[in-house]
Image: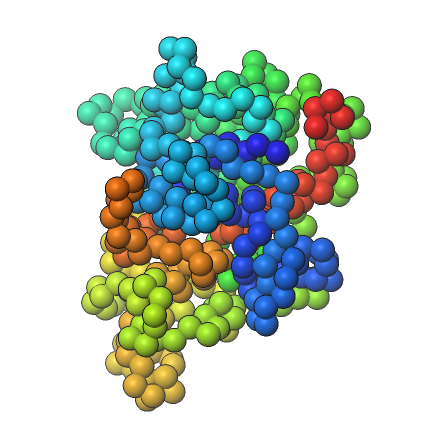
Amino acid sequence: MKLLSLFSGCGGMDIGFEGNFRCLAKSINPQIHPYWIKEKQGNWVIVQPTIFDTVFANDIRPDAKAAWVSYFSKRKKNANDIYHIDSIVDLVKRTRRGEKIFPDGIDVVTGGFPCQDFSIAGKRLGFKSQKSHLGVTLASDEPSIESRGQLYMWMREVVTITSPKLFIAENVKGLTNLEDVKEIIEHDFSDAGNGGYLVVPARVLYAPDYGVPQSRERVIFFGFKKSALRKEAHTALTQKSIPTAFDPYPIKTHGEGTGMPIVTCRDAFIDLVEPDQSEDASQKKYSKAKYMGFHCQGQTEVKLDSVGPTIRSEHHGNIEYRRLSVEHGGKYVDELNAGMSERRLTIRECARIQTFPDDYQFILKKTELNKAVSSSDAYKIIGNAVPCILAYNIAKNIEEKWLLYFKEDEV
């Protein structure tokens, strides 16, 4: 199934939707999903591939493309050509002028449209964002259809242009608490293709429920092409309580009642040595920003026996600590006594919390095709991503129900 990825970033959603990547064995519940494991490798597993293939990816960040291409070039010969550095607004405008931009035969469109304007950590301007679609401050305070807070509307335009059987949109939980934003977005998405999409009520997914060692919460929107749906699927998806057999939201795999404990930071950091002992460029690099006190964001150390904090995209040197010194309230005295110093989370530790595979390298030198990726770039693109394992749960659930949803002539 051909997948078109929007606001792709460094590809957390794309990795999850294609599968065939390495993750912690503890992130997969074999009692619930015994057939998801392709290969066991000690504390790690390689998960099965899915039916989805990313044929178009897009973002405005050159560093995100560089990292995406570096990873996916090991899996796709034309990775650099698949990823397009353009604003979605400009891509849609060029299409309207008659230029061929998007591939034919798209089955699924995914997109984590920008969340800064809906995030609790931001100014929460929502639809009244003062940033343009290119991320620069607008000259006028007047709301614009091309502002960052309105980019989901341009995702809707891509859905109308490509006419996929399914689209999946993702954003921060904070969106659901901002007036009636969720309902407005659901309504607007349903108008894609001249009202041709059935949008089921959005839900918030809690990442630890799916084997992700991070207290991340994300709202997910599903839109089904009405003309492609089987009659029984249409009936099920319009019920107030969707039957489990047709529910597009994945079932909980970790935590109470699942037979699998949540995955912790201690689990995620297994086999990682200290930066000065590592050969991994992403484990060597970490923010050297000084401790600023508990009144500032990002000045606490992670709890090893719990899930990690939400990895944010805007760090500005305040990424959380792997460990603090005793004078700053550090709890890992044995590590400090063993000579391990106060430091913030490394790039690799953040990537582990986001469930990126270790063969994804974030620290990159400049090439003829792509720009270099620095440690500050890496923190941002990792924080912007959808956890790979969360995306995999969504993808596999949809894959397993694909034939229940769609008519045979549409498959």
Q: Position of residue 50 (x, y in %)?
A: 63, 45
Q: Position of residue 127 (x, y in %)?
A: 38, 29
Q: How is the image coloured?
A: rainbow
Q: Is residue 304 above or below residue 135?
A: below
Quarter occupied by residue 104 = top right
Can you name the residue that lies furthest to the right here?
Answer: 232
Q: Is residue 343 above or below residue 152?
A: below
| Number of numbered markers | 0
Q: Position of residue 52 (x, y in %)?
A: 59, 39
Determine whether, in the image, residue 193 is placed left or right of residue 346. right
Residue in view at x 61 percent, y 18 percent: 196
Query: Residue 205, can we see it?
Result: no
Query: Residue 343, can we see it?
Result: yes
Q: Nearer the viewer, residue 65 or 369?
A: 369
Q: Nearer the viewer, residue 163 or 223?
A: 163
Q: Quadrant of the C terminus?
A: top right
Q: Nearer the viewer, residue 217 or 184?
A: 217
Q: Is residue 82 above or below residue 274?
A: above
Determine whether, in the image, residue 159 is placed left or right of residue 362. right
Residue in view at x 38 percent, y 38 percent: 80
Can you name the residue that lies furthest to the top here?
Answer: 97
Determine whether, in the image, residue 173 is placed left or right of residue 127. right
Determine whether, in the image, residue 151 is placed left or right of residue 387. left
Q: Is residue 220 above or below residue 145?
A: below
Q: Position of residue 203 (x, y in %)?
A: 58, 41
Q: Nearer the viewer, residue 47 or 353?
A: 47
Residue in view at x 33 percent, y 33 percent: 85
Residue in view at x 73 percent, y 31 percent: 405
Q: Quadrant of the N terminus?
A: top right
